[in-house]
Amino acid sequence: MAAHKDQNKTQPTEASVGAFLAAVEHPVRRADAYRLLDLMSGITGEPAQMWGPTIVGFGRYHYKYATGREGDAAAVGFSPRKGSLSLYGLTYGQESAALLGRLGKHKTGAGCLYVNKLDDVDEAVLAELVRLGYRHVTTALHQA
């Protein structure tokens, strides 16, 4: 069945997170992915779940835009892509801007944080970004 044109293309799947991470070719990216798995699962208390073929997500939230479009997304997550680690849900909280200034080497995009390798960033700051991002989408958005 084809996805509705307004439906989020990235849906949760039953695919194995372990098999996905084990198949990451680049050894540093694979090791960083396992570190992120431990970090994000420890902070959120949520089990890791594959969202689409390449995103490891933790928790979920429901969104609804003024346009009427709505759906579910991972509260926080990551993808060990060839060019960098893509981190999701960490830049939405209002306190995140100040933390990004202390994070270390990174780039930001539309809702994403890009890191070449975890050794380039302050892991304590990254952990706080995960906490804030998870709290933002699981509590602040539900109160709106």
Image (tube, helix red, strand yellow):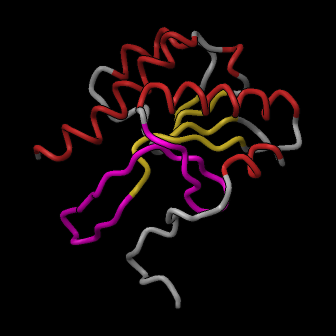
Instruction: Please count the marks in the image.
Output: 0
Q: Is the magenta stretch mostly helix, strand or loop?
A: strand
Residue 121: x percent and y percent? 62, 14
User: In this rendering, is residue 125 above or below 39?
Assistant: above
Residue pushed farthest bottom?
A: 1
Question: Based on the displayed image, in which of its 4 quarters is residue 54 positioned?
Answer: bottom right
Q: State the residue at coordinates (23%, 62%).
A: 64
Range covered by the magenta-colored residues: 46-72
Task: Quadrant for residue 6, please give it.
Answer: bottom left
Q: Does the magenta stretch include residue 64?
A: yes
Q: Is residue 2 above or below residue 23?
A: below
Residue drawn at x 41%, y 14% as measured from the top left? 99
Magenta stretch contains residue 1:
no
Horizontal side of 138 relative to 32 (left or right) equals: left
Q: Where is residue 113 in the image (x, y as percent from the top left)?
A: 54, 33
Q: Which residue is drawn at 27% across and 57% down?
A: 63
Pick the front one: 19 or 110:
19
Residue 44 appears in which quarter of the rendering? top left
Is residue 56 positioned above or below 7 on the image?
above
17 and 83: which is toward the camera: 17
Residue 37 falls left or right of residue 90:
right
Relative image position of residue 37 (x, y in whole percent): 61, 33
Judge by depth and name the residue closer to the eye, 87 or 127. Answer: 127
Residue depicted at 68% across the width and 55% down the height: 16
Image coords of residue 131 (percent x, y):
38, 24
Q: Is residue 107 left or right of residue 82?
A: left
